[in-house]
Image (cartoon, rainbow, N blue to C red):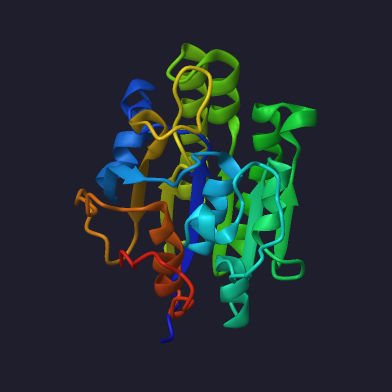
Amino acid sequence: METNRKVLLILCDGMRPDSLAACQTPYVDHFRAQSAATLSARTVMPSVTLPCHMSLFHSVDPARHGILTNTYVPQVRPIDGLVDHLYRYGKRCAMFYTWEPLRDLTRPGHLCRSVFASEKELGPGPATEEILAPALSVLRSDGPDFAFLYLGAPDELGHDEGWMSPGYLQAVSHAWDCIRRVTEALPPCYTVLVTADHGGHGRNHGDDCPEDMTIPLMIRGEGFAPGSALPGDVSIKDLAPTIAALLGVPANRDWEGRCLA
C-alpha cells in the first residue's frame, strides 16, 4: 500500500503516566487533546531499558529476543527489528539518541542518519540539546520516513533522585519542552507517537509492579481522533506493527503485537 505518511516516534525513558499531570507542563494537555491516548499501556518484563526497547522495535517479549539486561547479546533466532524491516521495503529511517546501547536496535547500514550524543560524557540535559538541532534539521529538510527520538533525562533523574521527585518531574517537563519544539516544527505529513519504555519507583525499575510496568502512549495524526482513547490493553509490542502500517508496510511475520491504526 502506497502512502505519503511519515512517522516520528518519541520515547521518554522512564516516564510514568502520572508524571504527565504532576510535571504541570501545559503542552502535555495540548498534545494529548490532539491525540488518541492511553495512560495504561504496558511494557514487558524485565522492565529494563534495553529489553523494553528491543521489545518495542522487535514486537516480541524479551524471552523471544533474548535481551534480559542492558547488555546486548546477539539473537539466537534473529528477528528483523522495525528499522531493518522498513529498510527492506525501501523506507528511509533516522535515529537520534543519547544512550549508546540503543545502537543495537538496528543493524549496521540500515539508517540514513544516526546522531548520538553521550549522556555519560555530557550529562542528560546537554546531551539531549546536542541531538535536538540535527533532529530538527533532518526532520524539516531530509524527511526520513521513520525517525526515532530518544529523550533519556527522566530515567537518569529517577535513578539519581527518585521517581516523582522534584528533579525527576523537572526532567519530564524538559522532555515535554523538547517534544513541543520538535512537533511544532514538523511537516504535517508526520504522525507522532509519544511513549515511554518503562516507569519506575523509588530510585529503580525492573519489577512487575504497576509503577514500573505502566506507560503512556499518545498518537497524533490522520486516523487518530483527537481526544479519543486508545484500547486499554495496549502493549509496547504494538508499536512496531502500528508504525509499519502507517508507512504502508505489512508487519513482519515474526512480530507478535497488533496494529492500533
Q: Residue furthest right?
A: 121
Say above or below: 26 vs 218.
Answer: above
- In the picture, which quadrant includes the N terminus? bottom left
- Percent coordinates x, y for residue 101 in the rendering: 71, 46
Do we see residue 57 in this rendering?
A: yes
In this rendering, would 12 be left or right of 110? left
Q: Is residue 155 above or below residue 35?
A: above
Quadrant in which residue 29 is drawn:
top left
- Vertical relation: 224 (above or below) 130: below
Residue 189 seen from this side: no
Q: Residue at x 70, y 34 (%)?
A: 127
Residue found at x 52% / y 28%? 174
Residue 208 percent across, percent down from the top left: 40, 35
Number of marks: 0
Q: Which quadrant is home to the C terminus?
A: bottom left
Picture coordinates of residue 68, whole percent (x, y)? 59, 46
Picture quarter containing residue 138? bottom right
Closer to the camera in the image, 241 or 204? 204
Extreme left residue here? 228
Q: Where on the picture, by quarter, is residue 155?
A: top right
Looking at the image, which is closer to me, 54 or 4? 54
x 73%, y 51%: residue: 115
The foreground one among 71 and 87 is 71
* Residue plotted at (70% across, 56% down): 104
Whole-percent x, y for residue 121 in the image: 80, 30
